[in-house]
Image (tube, rainbow, N blue to C red):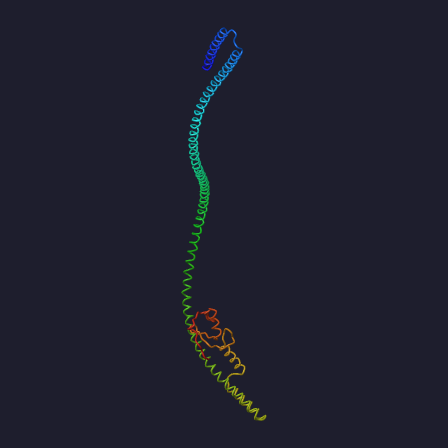
């Protein structure tokens, strides 16, 4: 608007100047009656230049006003941009603060979530434990009921058994009385048996003494048998020698000697053979029945061959083969028959 006023004032000034120029030209035209054609052409040219300059001035003033309005609009836009920038920076800082708060909140929520998950697991375990305890309690209650029922049954059975035991006890007492009577009879019988046993022991001692005497007599008979066997062998040799040297008479006389020898001997040939076999069997080892007796066990006085005794010792069976009594190495001694 100010530019417009300026342009109006400028146009007014130019009008006044143009009027002044017209008055001057008219006065000069009146002063010079003849006037020259060159000065009028110059005036027209100046007027055209004036008009052109006026238009250029108006355009310059308009462009100035438009530039000023553009500058004002640019300043306003700059102010608005600065305000917007400040607001955006503020919003950015607030957003950063909000993001930090959100991050801390998220971390806190995460930790809280983990704690809740742990508490949930603990609660689930506790719930499982509680269920197991409840199940155990139910099982215990059922077991208690069964135990009580079993106890009642056992009690009834025990009462029945007690009654049976009492009956059996009465019968046992009766049997005991009968057994006492039989025991008294058995004691009297035992006393008589003890007396008989003592008599039998005395008889056994007598028989043992007689057996020892018979063994000694048998030993003497065996010695005499050996002597007789030796004499019989010598007689047989003599008879054979006499039979070889003499004639048929010598044979008969030899037969007479043989008969005389048989008359001198108190045993027949068969008896002698039997006695020899018995003696050989007594001299043979009772285990193998092959080898002669060469050692004696001092604890039980039984005799065996060395091979059989060594075999028992190697087999860790240190028991007498005859009576089963245990012996040691020091109980084994040699014997010469």
Q: Count numbered badges in the picture.
A: 0
Is residue 292 positioned above or below 147 on the image? below
Q: Residue furthest right?
A: 248
Image coordinates of residue 322 in percent, x first then y, are 47, 71
In the rendered image, the vertical position of residue 105 relative to residue 42, given as above or below: below
Q: Nearer the viewer, residue 78 or 115?
A: 78
Residue 183, position as x, y percentages in the image? 42, 60
- Residue 279 image point, x, y percent: 50, 79
- In the image, is residue 5 above or below residue 228? above
- The residue lying toward the viewer, choosing from 16 and 31, is 31
Q: Is residue 57 above or below residue 287?
A: above
State the residue in front, 225 or 178: 225
**Image location of residue 254, percent across then percent down:** 55, 90
């Amino acid at each position: 608007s100010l530019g417009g006023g300026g342009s109006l004032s400028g146009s007014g000034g130019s009008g006044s100047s143009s009027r002044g120029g017209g008055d001057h030209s008219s006065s000069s035209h009146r002063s010079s009656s003849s006037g020259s054609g060159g000065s009028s052409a110059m005036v027209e040219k100046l007027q055209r230049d004036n008009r052109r300059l006026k238009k250029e001035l108006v355009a310059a003033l308009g462009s100035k006003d438009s530039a000023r309005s553009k500058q004002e609009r640019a300043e306003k836009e700059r102010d608005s941009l600065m305000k917007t920038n400040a607001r955006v920076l503020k919003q950015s800082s607030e957003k950063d603060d909000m993001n930090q708060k959100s991050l801390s909140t998220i971390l806190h929520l995460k930790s809280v979530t983990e704690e809740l998950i742990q508490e949930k697991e603990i609660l689930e375990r506790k719930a499982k434990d509680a269920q197991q305890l409840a199940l155990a309690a139910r099982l215990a209650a059922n077991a208690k009921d069964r135990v009580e029922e079993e106890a009642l049954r056992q009690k009834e059975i025990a009462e029945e058994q007690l009654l049976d035991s009492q009956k059996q006890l009465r019968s046992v007492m009766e049997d005991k009385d009968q057994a006492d009577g039989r025991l008294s009879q058995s004691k009297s019988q035992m006393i008589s048996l003890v007396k008989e046993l003592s008599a039998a022991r005395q008889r056994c001692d007598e028989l043992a003494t007689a057996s020892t005497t018979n063994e000694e007599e048998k030993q003497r008979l065996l010695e005499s048998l050996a002597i007789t066997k030796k004499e019989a062998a010598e007689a047989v040799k003599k008879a054979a020698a006499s039979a070889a040297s003499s004639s048929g008479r010598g044979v008969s006389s030899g037969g007479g000697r043989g008969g005389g020898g048989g008359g001198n001997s108190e045993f027949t040939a068969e008896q002698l053979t039997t006695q020899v076999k018995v003696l050989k069997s007594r001299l043979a080892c009772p285990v193998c029945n092959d080898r002669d007796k060469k050692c004696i066990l001092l604890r039980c006085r039984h005799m065996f061959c060395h091979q059989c005794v060594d075999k028992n010792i190697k087999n860790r069976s240190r028991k007498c083969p005859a009576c089963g009594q245990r012996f040691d190495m020091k109980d084994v001694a040699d014997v010469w028959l």
